[in-house]
């Protein structure tokens, strides 16, 4: 089983990649210029500490995912 903190870091990195690709895809579909400002996402995440990801909706925390959560097979 991988280290739970490594798993949280990996999830945070994947979420950053998804955010980047989503922005590019959105610009492509809406035919917006590269320099045009993106509208803020309604749901965002941030890696608050090495073992914690905070999910926010409209800037307010709605869920916290910890390394312990990821190491728990019953977490869903």
Image: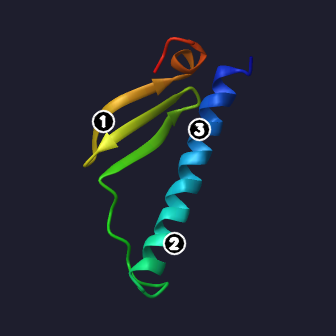
Residue found at the very far right of the displayed protein? 1
Q: Is residue 26 above or below residue 69?
A: below
Report the disc number at residue 11.
Answer: 3
In which quadrant is the C terminus drawn?
Answer: top left
Residue 16: x percent and y percent?
Answer: 55, 52
Residue drawn at (30%, 35%), measured in percent from left and top?
61
Which sits earlier in the primary sequence, circle 1 or circle 2?
Answer: 2
Circle 3 crowding by C-alpha within 10 Å: few under 14, some 14–19, many from 20: some
Left or right of 3 in this view: 46: left
Q: Is residue 34 above or below residue 68?
A: below
Judged from the image, the secondary structure of the residue bearing numbered disc 1 is: strand
Judged from the image, the secondary structure of the residue bearing numbered disc 2 is: helix
Q: Nearer the viewer, residue 63 or 52?
A: 63
Residue 62: x percent and y percent?
Answer: 29, 33
Left or right of 54 in this view: 7: right
Calculate the distance from the C-alpha at mark 3 to the C-alpha at mark 1: 17 Å
Q: Nearer the viewer, mark 3 or mark 1?
A: 3
Reading the image, the residue beneath label 1 is 61
Calculate the distance from the C-alpha at mark 1 to the C-alpha at mark 2: 26 Å
Report the disc number at residue 26.
Answer: none
Which sits earlier in the primary sequence, circle 3 or circle 1?
Answer: 3
Reading the image, the residue beneath label 2 is 24
Q: Is residue 15 above or below residue 35?
A: above
Judged from the image, the secondary structure of the residue bearing numbered disc 3 is: helix
Residue 14: x percent and y percent?
Answer: 60, 46
Is there CB contact under 8 Å for labels 2 and 3?
A: no
Q: Nearer the viewer, mark 1 or mark 2?
A: 2
């Amino acid at each position: 089983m991988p280290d739970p903190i490594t798993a949280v870091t990996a999830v945070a990195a994947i979420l950053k990649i998804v955010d980047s690709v989503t922005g590019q895809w959105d610009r492509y579909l809406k035919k917006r210029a590269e320099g045009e400002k993106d509208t803020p996402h309604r749901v965002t995440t941030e890696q608050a500490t090495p073992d914690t990801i905070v999910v926010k909706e409209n800037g307010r925390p709605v869920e916290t995912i910890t390394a312990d959560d990821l190491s728990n097979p019953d977490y869903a």
